[in-house]
Amino acid sequence: MRLDAPPLWLAGYPVNVTFESFDSYPAPRHQCRIEASAAAATATPWNMTLLSTTIESVKGNLGATLLNVKSVFAVQPVKEMTGSSVHCEVIPSTGIRIKFQEPWLFQIPTVTDPCINSIAFSSNANSNYLEAGQIEQVQVTSHRCETSGWPVSHRCWLTVGSDAELKLKKISQTGFSSVHQLKLTKSMTNSDWQVRCQVNQSMQHQYPDVYSRKSDQPKVFFRGRTNLEGFDVETNKLLSINISVSEAWPPISSIVCQLFYFTKGQLEEVRVSRYILYTLCECVCVSAYITSTSARL
């Protein structure tokens, strides 16, 4: 007979216990239970639920058909189970019980608190927009399980719309916290993106995926493409400049133009005019009177 159970038990996360018996006939029945420790003797009895039983036929040394039986039981750990034991029995069809004794008896380890996992960004989601092309840092932290003695590992991906996921580069991990690099792209300007991370605890437990919250994600802007056209003019004549902006996000709501000119070798700045540039990126005419041939826009 053989009894297998994972070494990591997390409060609230189901644990599967596998009990097997070999080379028997006819097929026996398996029964498992938890026997409370002295410290938890007054606790409510804990039930183990039979999930599945499989039977495999094998040939014995003399050619007889024998049966291997495998049963899987589930239990919902609570912290009070620490130090208690899992006991399993084989009940042959003859009705005679054979108790599954040590050294195969499994003693339940310390039942620890599970990790609470979160994703944060280095920038403040309520701050100004970040420009496409910048590198943002994504921090993944596993809380409440720091004293468990079971380290964690983090992996993260970027999802943009229906596009394939892009794995983020991990640049550091200290204890139960890690930092990953996220390059902001033009495709992220519509906010239809998320960061997805996986948290694995000592290769024993895979937590449900954790996703970044839309309200915490930085806003991404794209400068767009600007086209500026000017015309040669004479002194004391009206200067007309045509400006067109395309692909900017968020849409441009206004534009400020300035006239720069040199006076005695120093560059000075004079605010010329401010015009509304429509969100449809139509051309806008900005006018200024030129008073010096050394001026430039």
Image (cartoon, rainbow, N blue to C red):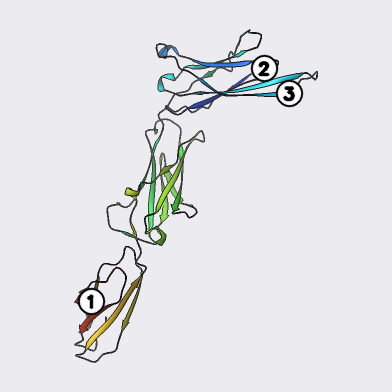
Image coords of residue 180 (percent x, y): 42, 50
Circle 2 SS class: loop
Identify the residue under disc 3.
58
Q: Residue furthest bottom?
A: 234
Q: Amino acid at mark 1?
A: Gln
Distance, label 2 to label 3, CA atoms, is 12 Å
Identify the residue under disc 1.
258
* Of pointers 2 and 1, the one earlier in the residue sequence: 2
Image coords of residue 16 (percent x, y): 53, 26
Where is residue 161, by image quadrant?
bottom left
Asked if 62 appears above or below 271 in the picture, the reply is above
Q: Nearer the viewer, residue 286 or 177?
A: 286
Taking the image as drawn, is residue 139 in sight?
yes
Label 3 CA crowd tier, 10 Å (few <14, some 14–19, many 20+): some
> Is residue 101 shown left or right of residue 273?
right
Identify the residue under disc 2.
27
Circle 1 SS class: strand
Image coords of residue 221 (percent x, y): 34, 61
Going 40% across and 50% down the picture, which residue do you hit?
194
Going 50% across and 26% down the picture, which residue do you hit?
15
Q: Amino acid at mark 3?
A: Val
- Are the two marked residues, 2 and 1, in contact with CB atoms closer than 8 angstroms? no
Q: Amino acid at mark 2?
A: Ala
Distance, label 3 to label 1, CA atoms, is 89 Å
- Are the two marked residues, 3 and 1, in contact with CB atoms closer than 8 angstroms? no
* Of pointers 2 and 3, the one earlier in the residue sequence: 2
Q: Which mark is residue 139?
A: none
